[in-house]
Image: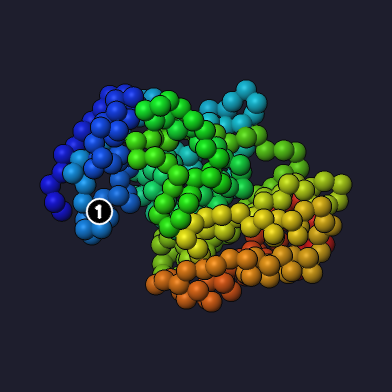
Amino acid sequence: MRPFDLAEPDTVDEAVTLLHDNESARPIAGGTALLLMVKAGLFQPETLISLRRLRGDLTGIARQDDGGVRIGALTSLTDIGRSPLVRETFPVITQTLRTLSNVRIRNVATIGGHLAHGDPHMDLPPVLLCLGARLRVRGPQGERWIGLDDLYSGYYETTLARDELITEVVLPAPPPEWAATYVKFTALSADDWPAVGVAVSAVRRDGTLGDVRVAIGAAMERALRLAAVEAQLEGKQPSADLVRAAADSAAQEVKPLGDLRGSAEYKREMVRVHARRAVDRVLQALAFEEAVR
């Protein structure tokens, strides 16, 4: 690795100022992804800005007055996975974190870094898309909010400015009779990033599906929701034929990227298979057993 300077600001404002004043500087939290890129020579920073001293301000998990949950950006994935509040309110997150990479990574990686890195293979983005996550972001001009569906703009690209930091993730309270799940397929090893990840959430509303959200990760250049598939399921009485048709639509709507985890066509088929499995799981959780194959 080439030598680089390391700055350790004491406040968020100081960190933002350092980023603003130094175009070559980049923030580092857990460093689980960034340092691999540095070691591989893919990224050669002149200055890294450690966020270690900001943990007192940017960690923690708390319920909000409206029933939603706030998670500080520097909260580790392990702490999120072990949180009773997260397990009670959003069990899909707890489920997802049990198989996200390995325990060594989860102990160090932070949710803010996980989202800001922009790697399309990450597990949490499709899940949080289905949960309606919003991000509080701090920059030189002050704070702003970004919906997670507006964060990713391309392959390893986000809408964050170079001198902005995510400070917290906020999840709205789930509605009554709601369920969500995440299923994934890893092609290389059990703790590898997924080749395909599918998240689905919905509510049961008078015998039909409502507020349907379907999000895909890993297979494409960025995680995103599949609006056409959601519309196909919204307001419908579930059936095995409907689930099969929705899975077929998911496979048609995605534009997979081939890589070492599989060709584009292989990933398309994996989207079809795992979209069907994810929808089936949500239907079971909502007591639509008669619609599950």
Q: Give the residue number, with chain letter if any, for mark 1.
A: 43
Residue placed furthest toward the right: 206
Residue positioned 44% across, 47% down in the render: 158
Q: Answer left or right for 94 relative to 155.
A: right
The image position of residue 278, as x and y in percent, is 65, 60
Residue positioned 30% across, 45% down in the render: 31
- Taking the image as drawn, is residue 77 in sight? no
Residue positioned 46% across, 27% down in the render: 143
Q: Quadrant of residue 107?
A: top left
**Front position in the image: 214 or 103:** 214
The image position of residue 230, as x and y in percent, is 70, 56
Image quarter of the C terminus: bottom right
Q: Answer left or right for 134 relative to 292.
A: left
Q: Type of residue at label 1?
A: Phe
- Number of dots carrying numbers: 1
Q: Residues within 10 Å of mark 1 (few under 14, many from 20)?
A: some
How is the protein colored in the picture?
rainbow
Residue positioned 40% across, 54% down in the render: 156
Q: Answer left or right for 56 relative to 147.
A: left
Q: Secondary structure at mark 1?
A: loop
- Taking the image as drawn, is residue 194 in sight? yes
